[in-house]
């Protein structure tokens, strides 16, 4: 089994911040367009029961599944019963010890939090740009999900290796609250949040507010604070609870 | 017929710059991965003759076609014979006068220029991240294509309205070189290029080079100078040559 490298993992998590911010800025160029989230209003032939947003998410994940996206540990899908890949995906050796990566999936919790985020992020109203809005929703969700699950899996594995006896004891007694405490590093979280604010500002510093909607750093700060960081830790706990006994 | 608003058009073109830059930075997080462009090496069941990149582009455009993307004037596809939309797309009244938007398509010229760009933009070598690389290639290409065709269509219509007699005369005699001269505004191009350099720097100002590949502004400058701007003007000329005679 390969040894996880905490520096590399932290670097990857940090690098994904720009990706998430850029995709949220892209989505914010369109209005909320509430119609796209309305079930039964997709206007899509043969998909009368669902929303245009869900239809796009589903089609995207079906295509991505064919290309093998969900073989990658941190790529957890939002929808179920996806087709098998049509190509082989070589992943290299992994340091992770878990039977099914979907044990760690928190996508069902990301979705409602993202819906709240859209309402804060985008201008109110309807600009008719439904196709572009759902497209950017899906890309933003994928970037957020990748960040959360990558953190959940690899950070948890690192922490386990550094503290396996204590964690084994807490897992054996299903002490989720104590696990959460053990996984929380307030100074690291504070650094992330401060960095996010700076990045959101800097990435838009040359943007012209007349030609481009500027998003407020506080919105992304809040989303990281209330969703990204807590769901990463939730995923870490799931990982530790389901971590394979035979590999301990 | 609606009157085109040059200020709004310029604003939209300027706003698309951040989108293009962000998507190119995302692609640059992966190596060149030359294998993905190799025909016959897709490793994709039932697509043995083509590259993984082409396969992804094709599948993406098929999905996008179902959602109606190519009903939008500036969204020109890279592949042909795509399925019809499965939803109605309401576009509002247009100021454009052309029978088929594909008369203005320069996607076949964007593709080889983008391939050269990837080699300058990304680190040499192979990191095995094929799925992510082709995904980001496709998103970057779509953003570039949108910018070029939006400019070609709407800027040309504006310029036509401001100078229709002269343009009619040049079009009647198929004077492409003189049309190109008439369409060229060096001071506007200079402004765009200077703005691009600033944006590329600013958008990465908070990025940590240890965790995120930083791209050089000169590469995007050169791509705008040698590809985006010339192909926009090429598209403008095509628009003027094919502009509907009956609407003059």
Image (spheres, coloured by chain):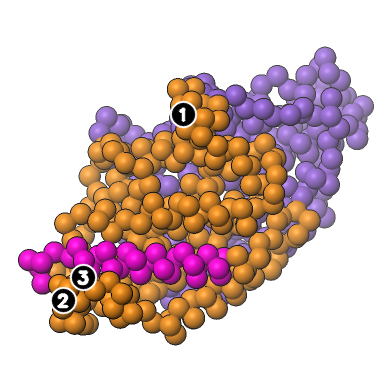
Chain colours: A purple, B orange
Secondary element at tag 1: loop
Q: Is residue A183 visible?
A: yes
Q: Where in the figure is residue A74, as x and y percent of width and height?
A: 65, 35
Q: Label 3 lies in what chain? A: B
Whole-Å distance between the Cαs marked 1 and 3? 40 Å
Classify 10 Å Cα crowding around label 1: few (below 14), some (14-19), many (20 and above).
Answer: some
- What residue appears at the point 49 percent right and 81 percent down from the top-left corner? B190
- Co-location on one chain, circles 1 and 3: yes
Q: Of the two numbered discs 2 and 3 on the same chain, state the one appearing first in sequence.
A: 2
Which is more toward the observer, B171 or A232? B171
Left or right position of B192 against B84: right
Q: To which residue does mark 1 refer? A: B49
Q: Judge from the rendering whether residue A104 lies leftward or rightward of residue A175; answer left or right.
A: left
As helix, strand or loop, the secondary structure at mark 3 comes to loop
Which region is colored magenta? B220-248
Query: Mark 2 — residue?
Result: B168
What residue is at 53 percent from the left and 43 percent from the top? B135
Labels 2 and 3 positioned on one and the same chain: yes
Q: Given this view, does label 2 or label 3 mark the residue nearer the observer?
A: 3
């Amino acid at each position: 089994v390969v040894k996880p490298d905490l520096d590399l993992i932290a670097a990857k998590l940090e690098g994904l911040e720009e990706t998430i911010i850029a995709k949220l800025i892209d989505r914010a160029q369109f209005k909320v367009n509430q119609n796209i989230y309305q079930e039964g209003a997709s206007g899509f032939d043969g998909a009368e029961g669902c929303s245009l947003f869900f239809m796009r998410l589903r089609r995207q994940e079906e295509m991505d599944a064919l290309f093998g996206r969900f073989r990658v540990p941190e790529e957890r899908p939002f929808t179920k019963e996806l087709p098998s890949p049509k190509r082989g995906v070589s992943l290299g050796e992994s340091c992770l010890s878990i039977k099914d990566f979907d044990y760690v999936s928190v996508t069902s919790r990301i979705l409602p939090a993202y819906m709240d985020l859209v309402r804060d992020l985008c201008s109110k109203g309807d600009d008719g740009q439904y196709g572009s809005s759902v497209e950017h929703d899906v890309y933003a969700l994928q970037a957020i999900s990748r960040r959360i699950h990558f953190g959940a899996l690899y950070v948890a594995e690192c922490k386990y290796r550094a503290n396996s006896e204590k964690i084994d004891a807490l897992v054996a007694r299903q002490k989720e609250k104590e696990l959460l405490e053990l996984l929380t590093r307030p100074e690291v979280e504070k650094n992330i949040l401060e960095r996010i604010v700076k990045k959101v500002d800097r990435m838009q510093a040359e943007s012209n507010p007349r030609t481009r909607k500027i998003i407020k750093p506080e919105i992304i700060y809040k989303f990281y604070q209330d969703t990204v960081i807590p769901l990463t830790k939730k995923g870490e706990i799931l990982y530790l609870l389901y971590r394979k006994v035979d590999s301990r």
